[in-house]
Image (cartoon, rainbow, N blue to C red):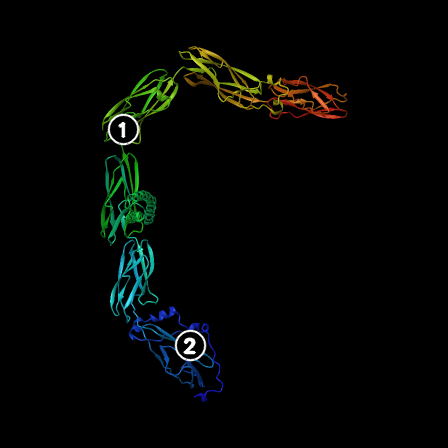
Amino acid sequence: MASRFPGRTPTPRLLSREGLKSDTLLPSKFQREKFVNSKQEASTGGSFLPRIGPCVDMSETRQKIARMVKVCMESSPYFQLACPSDVYHIVPPGASAPLRIRFTPDENKNYSHELTCTTAKEKIVVPLRAIFARAILDFPAQVDFSECPVKHRTQKILLVRNVGNRTAHYQLSTQSPFSVVPIAGTLGAGDTMRVTVRFHALTNGDHFGSLAVCCNPGEESIHTKLHGEAVDVDVVLSTNSVEAGKTFITMAYQTTVFLENRSNITAHFQWKALPSEEDDYEEKRRQCRLLHPLGEEWLENFTEEKEVEKVQGFSEDHSALLRSRVQEKKAKVQDDPLLFSSDIFFIEPLEGEIEPNSTAEITVTFEPLEALEYQSVAYCHVSGHESRIPLCLRGEGQGPLIELSSPTLNLGKIFINTSYVYEVELINKGALDAPFTYIPSTTEVDFCFTVEPEQGMIAPGGTQTVQISFHTTVLGSFEEKFQFSVAGSPTPVILTIRGIVTGPNLHFDLPELDFGDISFGFPYTQRCRLTNCSVVPVTFKLRMSDDGTQPAVDSLDQIHKEGDPSWRKGIHFYVEPREFTMNPSQGTILPQGHQDIEVTLCSNTVMRFKRRLLVDLEGIAKEVASVVIKARCLVPELRVYPQILLYHECHLKVPYERKLVIRNLSNLPGCYGLIPQQRKDDSPVLYSSPKPCGIVQPYGTAEIPVIIEVQTLGEHRTKALVGVFGDERNPRPSISAGVW
């Protein structure tokens, strides 16, 4: 056979694995092909070679010349070529050369190998596969629950058969809100079983999942698509709130609400304390966290007990016992359904079932413990409803009910230092005994009242007369609230007493004193008369509203303060100036008598005044009479002439005198002053005045003599400043004195 081969064997072209990737077998693709027709595969009972990618038939050549094909296969105990390996075969044009492969398995499992065919131009790798017997469960491709009630368990039963040729040791799994029963087991070849798939969604909407089926170890699971749509069913409360109204404490109010199931399922309901399952979860987490400090307390107690046991000679594993107790407590917390619970509102029944198209009666009871307003919310957790249905509970506890025969007692005008007695009645209009107690006030007016009795008990429908005595030495109107507390009632019974206490009648003969325009720092006086119209003598004291305490500065005093800083910087008070004086400021006025009063205003503030002269009665009342005082304080406009004083030629250190003229252009007197010179060692000109300060009358003039002494030779100029008392622009514009 070798003589028919060509003298030179052509070198075959080798193909890499990457180049053959499209023709190789992928695990996922192989698995799909294995299960495309599971029944057909199971019926063969033997091995088969799956079709992998675009195969090239290397056993046949369609060219016009013969081809040499080298067939080889690696040594394997399971796969053997019927002909020698690594031998060239000549395939004539248009002909085929069959190859026989012997397969000898020694156990029931999958086998794989490769056959390589090489020509002068290409290399073809043919995969060999042998699939052992397997179990195949014929689950449907999809299970659709369609529309189902939310929070309600819906199930479908699947009849599943093992169409494979071996026993299936299966495992089934899925995800919430889907579940499956059974989750594992064994099913013989050809046998059938029931599989229950349940759908229990907690929220509305579409839900998707998959049922994973694994029945052959080492192989990927088969997945069945699961779908269900959860919707609310028609379960409603007859009302969303219960208004219990006012209910006497120790008594009860009861009403009925209806929970109507208009659906075709049996609805299970529970009355919960919290609005959602998430809140239930958080509450249980909180309670579990609170168990840790409890565990620490137990540990401390166990430590003490352990010390005692050491002394007594025996010991016990306290830490294990402690962990066991904490776990028991946590288990109780997790098992707690957190049903609605209240000391005031009660719901019966707390849980139950409602048949389709039926109604359940729910009894709500309100039992107040105190006279308070109560409010709570119970949440109905019902299957078929995603969210819990709230029921608002409101009620008000009513204690003993006491009312006054008259809530207001108007005394009108009463006289000072006179005693009065009044009576009111407390009436019990409730169904309970009403113990009452008078609550004393701390106000000044309250000390003028006496209440009798201060406490007592009033039977239902009964009354109690209360006497109120009044005697005061304080003038003026008053309104006092007297409180009687009632045991069991948060709101006291209030009696309002109002009246006017009158005393001596004083009045001024003028409604106001108007000073008009006044000059800064000059005193002005007005007179008025205070008359006592009562039949008793009155001791009075006068005061001015909003007046200061530091004495005001009079212009007559100011002109004697030549070097005072106020000429340059103005007046500065540490406190507000006292600008008003009254003469007399206090005294006694006989019955039907009067007192003439002089009011003097010396203003040190440029402003408009509107004050009140007040009359106080010592030991009786304040501000029993008043008169309004008006004024406007101004600073007159003063001008200085001439602007320049010329002294011409002067001898050194010889005094020379000239005069400045102060002219008043207003109708108010003014106060002026020459600002003292701030002398220095090198001052060329010294000036002074024998009369630097003075007063200039309205529309008048005044003179300031200015004496200078020249200290150095040459032509000099210096400035002399004149201040106006009260003018914020102090000092006035400078006057230049020229010397040459």
Question: Which quadrant of the view contains residue 222?
Answer: bottom left
Q: Amino acid at mark 1?
A: Ile
Check the picture and name the quadrant holding the C terminus: top right
Residue 280 point in image, percent of width and height: 32, 48
Q: Is residue 725 visible?
A: yes
Residue 603 point in image, percent of width and height: 55, 20
- Residue position for label 1: 402
Q: Residue at x 43, y 72 (%)?
A: 22
Residue 111 point in image, percent of width and height: 35, 74
In the foreground, 316 or 196: 316
In the foreground, 563 or 738: 563
C-beta proximity under 8 Å, tags 1 and 2: no
Q: Is residue 388 visible?
A: no
Q: Is residue 316 above or below residue 181?
A: above
| Disc number for residue 590 | none
Q: Report, in whole angstroms, how far the alpha carbon at label 1 lies from the one at label 2.
A: 108 Å
Q: Secondary structure at mark 1?
A: strand
Which residue reaches farthest bottom?
A: 3
Q: Is residue 661 above or below residue 304?
A: above
In this rendering, which labeled residue sits more in front, label 1 or label 2?
Answer: 2
The numbered mark, 1 or 2, whose residue comes first in the sequence reads 2
For the image shown, how many numbered marks are present on the structure?
Answer: 2
In the foreground, 511 or 439: 439
State left or right for residue 336 relative to residue 21. left
Q: Secondary structure at mark 2?
A: strand
Q: Is residue 72 above or below residue 550?
A: below
Check the picture and name the quadrant holding the N terminus: bottom left
Q: Amino acid at mark 2?
A: Val
Residue 693 point in image, percent of width and height: 64, 18
Q: Judge the density around disc 1: few (<14), some (14-19), many (≥20) Cα neighbours within 10 Å.
A: many
- Residue position for label 2: 125
In the foreground, 76 or 387: 76
